[in-house]
Image (cartoon, coloured by chain):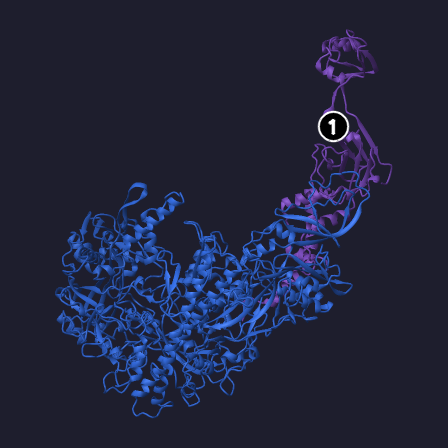
Amino acid sequence: MKAIVPLNVAALRVSSPDSTNVTPGAGFAGRTAAFDLLPHGSRATQASTGDTIWLPLGQGSPSVPLETGVHLHWELPEYFKRGRQDPATGAIAFPPAPTRWLVTRSLATWDAAAGRYGAPRPASWVVESDYVSATLPPGPDGIPRPAVPVPLTAPDGTPFMYLGRVVEAARWDPAAQGAASYLPHYTGPGGTPLYLTSIGFVGAAFSGYYPDCRSVFGFWDAFADEPGLHAAITGNNPVRFRASYTVIGWLPDPARDPLAGLADDVASQYGQYLSQAREQRAKVTSTPADVFARVTASQYGWQFSDRAVSYTLGDGDALATLDVPDGTLCAGTMQDVVWDQAGPAAGVPFLATPAAGQPWTDQVEIAIGNTTVQAVSALVKSHLDAPGGAPVLASYETLLNALQLGMLRDLEVPGSTLATLEQSLHERAFSAVDGGHRWTITATAAPGAQASPAVTLPLALAERLAALNAAQLAYDQARSRLLAAREQLFMDWVIYVKQFCRTPPGTDVVPANTLGAFLGSATAGELHAVIAAAAATGLLRLAADAGTGRITGVATADPATTLAGQVAAARQAVATALAGLAEGWELDAVPADPFWQPTDPVLVLEGNRLDPARRNGPGQSVAVRVDGELIARLRLGGAPGEATVTAGAPPGVAAPPAGMPSGPAAAAVLAEAALLDPGWAAVIAAAAGQGPLAPALAACQGGGSPLDGATAGGLYAAVRAAGYQRAADPAASATAPGPLTVTFTGASGPALPPDPVGWNAQAALPEFSATRADPFLPVWMTWELRLDPLARDAAGGYPAGTLADRFVLGDDEIDLAYAAPAAFTTRAPVSYQGTVVLSKKPFVSLTEQISRYQQEFPGDAAGAGLARAQADLAGRKVLAQALDTFSLAQTLRTTIPQIPVADLVRSPDPVTKAIAAAATATAGDNWYASGFNGLTAISAGPQAQYNYGPLRAGFLEITRLTLVDAFGQVMELTTAADGPGAAAGTLPLTPAADLAPAAGDAANAGRAYLPPRVLAPARVSAQWLSARHDPAVAGFSADFAEAGDHPATSPVCGWIVPNHLDVSLAFYDAGGSPVGSFGLEHGASTYRTRAGNLANPGDDLDADLGPVAAPRVNPHVARLMRFVARQPAGFLAALMAAIEGSDQFINPASATQDASLAVLVGRPLAIVRTAQSLATAGGVLPASQASTTKADALSAAVAGKWYDYGDRSARTTAGLGQVSIPVRLGELTDVDDGLVAFLPEEAGDAPYSVVYAAAGPAAGASGVLRPGPDTVELTLNGPARTFTMIVDPRAPVHVTTGILPTVSMQVPPDQYLRAMRELSVAFTTRPVLAGQPGLRLPLPAQAGFTWSWVAAGDAPAPLAPPPAPDVPSYGYSPQQLLEGWLDLIPDSPQPSDGSQ
Amino acid sequence: MTMFSRAARREAITSAFAGPAAVAATLGEVTVPDDLAAWLGRLLTLAGVPFGYLVPDEAMLPPESIRFFRLDEQWVTALLDGAFSLGRNLTAQAGGASASLDGALLGPVAASARAAAPLRPRAEVAPPGPADAGAPWTGFLLRSRIVTDYPGLGVNVYPAGATPADPQPALLPVRRLDRLGPRGDTLLCLVHGEAYRVDVHQAPELLHYGIDDYAPPAAAGQGPSAGKKLRTFRRAADGSVTFGPGTVDVAIGASFRPRSPRVLRLADLATALAAANGGGPVDSADMGFAMTEGVGMVSFVSRGAS
């Protein structure tokens, strides 16, 4: 059984006038990759670097114009275009693409005399996509077809060969060519075997862009096999014919077929499910068919019908037999391509614009946002009326964003989801960059059970784990830095090798010889530094469990002195310590917090001609049939009686060539194509004996060409209708010239119609012109923009106050904002341009979310309006695209085709040889695997002159946008002249709310404001500090920072329980035992020891705390209490007011604590400590690449001999590392933020000087201040700052920087609950009456706790809650009035594990 | 550019908690959970309040005494407040969020508690309507042997102007009538409204047949001497009853069994009664009418302003 996967085939007609006047001209773009232009040999005048093989789109005429004929291009199914990341190496691998394509054409010429087309006649070719040859392979008909040059070394040393060829099907012999003629015979730079994928040697657009993949995923039909036609079309003579094409692709190696392992997959997954069900004694409810459906949907995105799988079950539901598709055929048709150059159409080009020599244009509206979601919202908003003015529109935009993110319904839930929405939107303006690994310890999960949450560890073990994480962090950072250093080395080498090859030499800022010496060798210079850094870092190999993906171990071949060796040793130490514990623990490596890199702004364009090319369908999955479900019979029912035509009946249907695997399935595909093609209607009708009904049959089939006057209808239109549900044996009816109903059915069972993705026909494009019938399928966008960038100082550096002085992280903002008029830019705009592959799903999120919303809230009052909006949006012609490489260009880098380091021009070149050797010297650490050769420096030109801008900020305006379609057709985009004010020569923008210039900034209207962003992967490192440390473990002399969001030991140093009945703050130690309280007595701040403490009758603070050097309580609690004791009464009053004021702003979303205990304990606040820092990946910043003058970065690096990238990065990043970055701790208005106050710490025993509390007195009082925008400032890779925080532990603390996503940190519930349980809380109680027998108070019984009565100066006396306090027990008089404390004391300590 | 204004939100939160009125306006209709309202309602009936707080000194309630009282509204409100804000120890400073919240909630909570305070159902007493919400709560504490000796004492409490003789006597709803402790001698009664007349009576289920005197037999074999004061009556053919002028003493000693002189021979008794009433047969209705005696009751009537 074969799976027939729909393949989208598009056809472009190129007439003789098109090929001579249109396709070589400005309105056409050619191929982008030209490995055949790679300089080689001593006569070359350029260096053999990657940029020479890259032909920028739309700049000049294409090197190879499209020739006369029909050009076919097929889009690979999505499965083949999706890369999969290897979890262990991080490398992205693409599945092998089909490499054999049977292209079948049925052609019918117009018989002018008869006034109809003649009978269709078939012809077939085979395209061999991975055929490799040193010379351009001859075409089947003597006309050479362009093949794709690829970077493989030919036998004669030429650094390129040709990929792909076309063979006449009749002469095709799969056994004729040796293995050396095909790509799998060759290996890549690292010795990895090559195979053809959707990205080829070029990149993401390779398989989707015809000029780059001709004769690989495309076919040029020159009609050379039809000499008459060929002469007519090339001679521009009147001719009329029509052709239908069917393309069938397969993988010649069955082992590489996507479905090769499907049966095993299904069997093993079903087996796993079965054994799980048995283990859990659950009923077996899933069948192998369910597993099959799940596997095919998730792994392939293919939806099969029930008939694609059959199975039998044996004993205990075990799988006995299983029959699933075992091979893949990608098949699609492009039918009824009419070529009419007869009569009035003679000589008229198909593709030309009304204005001769000009490209097509489209007037568009442009919205810009940090994300597609925001840009779409801005675009939709710009179309809305504003009944309530700008604020209402802004609210619409917010709601649209919320709708698209699926958060709209959450906004109605009480809480602070607007804050969550804002954070979520802000975070989406960043992309995550791998942050390395982090180790955690979890309790071993029983088989089938859910893994337990992280646990609190014994202190010594936690310290060993912290040491392991520190080693892992050092290793990960070193590896990141190593990649940066290798990239830098490559960029330097590119400059060197270009200079080295340049004639005449001597005109360079850094002479080639000097630069060569700087690059050095394996023993000196930059190369040596890179090699030495790799040696010092070592290489860690993670061993992952194949089933679960868990990382079960690490290994390294490097010595213990390397960072990798240290990780291995530290891991061994933890593992050893774990083994000594009784319980079952698991040590796991999980992904560490990622670094965040700002994304490039996204443009959303709407215009009339911008039909997004969603060639593989709008959804995530596509309907796939098996060969038995193909249409193989037409049952014609009508007035003249029934008749049936079977697949074999119409004469002249093409047959697959001999030697083609899956021949019967291919034959069925070809037969179905004929049965569905109106071009065959006459033949089919005749075969059925219903000749006169041929036009009716054609109408039932549908999909006829508009150039032949066909109208929409039939099965072709039905499967394309909105909401079409695939049904077996579809039927279609027509009435003229007679009534006819056609039922499309299978050979031996029901048939399913093809998915529209794989069934296409010529279509009219009236938005282009009345006669246009050739597609425009946008694939690329080229953009040109101007940035008015953030100014630096006269010396070229960023002053430390760049952000703090010119921007504000206001209380009201999540991002840095400026005040109009803008005065932070250079006012000297810099131009940038780039080319990107278009993404295809702009409005999908909005329409999908509306659908989801309607499903979930079927009765919603807004349902009808939403449905209208959805229909409206679905019909919009909208494209979205990020301005890729714009940010990269700010750091003076740009992408370059990745070709191996080699000097093919000059010899000897020891520097290049040394680098090339080093790149592949280390097994397992091939430099090419990490793509070190993917970037090149922008070292000269306007962008490099003073425009290095690693701190991206400023105002952006678009100057030019063009689209390039799958065949190379170009469209210029224009805007209406009366858009929002923008400078002449620019395209006005509608910015999303967070890219809108400040209110009142008229000078920047129509532009987008780019808030400051650091153009390096960075992360806020917000870490808990352990409450204690154990100096017995080597390397721990102070409390340590915890990696990750679940600290291994509790970070809670102590507790503060505010008691305003007493007007006091009671302090508790980490273990929950009371220390004492500070209260206001007669206007003075007074310390009182804890209730019932007889040892300290004088309420002496020092007596309770112990010596300064060795306090009896947690040292941080002691320091904080001593700090409070030193402050005047006003301080205590202000602190208490701040604590009380914060109450209304804290209402945790997930207060998961023990409710009854919470009622008793009230609102204890935890004293915790954190370390805050900002780190970039590798701890380095993107060094400037400028080399225009001797003062520029490259010259300085060479002169300073800064071989190490760290040295260079520190000195050539315009002082970015010194820029103070404002940080906001806590989020007062987010009720799910628990920060009450924080105290910056200094070194020493008296670390505190001031308390910051957002809910404190507005003006600040007595050392209790509200934090300002510049209260906390950090520098990139600068030292961590530590803070003591007073938090409500039930809610997280947010850390906001604006330049990075907001992070939150929370004491895990298991830790604070545990600590809270151990709080021995004393409740001030007064006055109470006590009778003669004793005190009888109505007390709630609390399991695990005992109530005690503490009178001043007395020890606690246990108190039993009386069963019924209101029952008189006479003899109580006289009563006494008492005051004291009720103390809730835990009965016995919790089982100790040493951590508390 | 921000999606929403933190300043405005901060202002909104602050003003929402600015005072009890602001909190109340924000909250709108407050619904107190049923179980919470029920618990607080029971507290309103002083359930769980240590007895020492109700009677600070035993001398205020000596044995064999009854004390009438009226509940102090303020005291009850303070009691509710204390219970309601248990654990919220941030309430001392005026203007604090918690204080405002408590202030805003106390009213609705107290109202819910009052509505949920238990009511001893009596068919003839309409549940208190909203108009009665402001009525005082009054009651009495009775410390006496009769509490132990006569379990199930009942109480009828009448407001001023109402008497048991009214065709539809207006009774005050009894909120609580509890003997404090399973073997206690103290009875606590709480009614909703100003009590004017309080009838304390034995448990109504003590309704019984009764005779007026009885002396055991002087010697074995003799009958006891016993008498019944019979109120004579006549029953007409239509069933209507006419009472005679007074009572007649009927000696019924002979109606007891000689061998077990505490057991009546009802046929003999009926004959004796019939004879005393002027002849004619006595059916079970006549018998019940003649023999049934009510329970003991003591009435207390207010002498004036209490």
Residue situated in front as seen by the camera: A711 or B62: B62
Kindly indicate the quadrant of the structure image that contains residue B35.
top right
Question: Which residue is tagged 1?
Answer: B203
Residue situated in front as seen by the camera: B128 or A973: B128
Give coordinates of residue B197: x percent, y percent: 81, 34
Q: Quadrant of the C terminus of chain A?
A: bottom right
Please tell me which residue is depicted at 70% across the width and 40% down the height of the picture.
Answer: A1364
The amino acid type found where label 1 is placed reads: Ala
Residue situated in front as seen by the camera: A796 or A536: A536
Position of A653 with respect to A778 (left or right) is left
Give coordinates of residue A287: x percent, y percent: 33, 46
Q: Is residue A1238 above or below residue A1383?
A: below
- Disc 1 is placed on an element classified as loop
Residue situated in front as seen by the camera: A406 or A288: A288
Kindly indicate the quadrant of the structure image that contains residue B230.
top right
Q: Is residue A973 above or below residue A626?
A: below
Please tell me which residue is depicted at 73% across the width and 48% down the height of the picture.
Answer: B79
Q: Chain of mark 1?
A: B
Kindly indicate the quadrant of the structure image that contains residue A1073.
bottom right
Chain B on-screen colour: purple
Q: Which chain is blue?
A: A
Give coordinates of residue A893: x percent, y percent: 39, 79
Position of A62 with respect to A1100 (left or right) is left
Give coordinates of residue A225: x percent, y percent: 14, 69
Q: Is residue A868 visible?
A: no
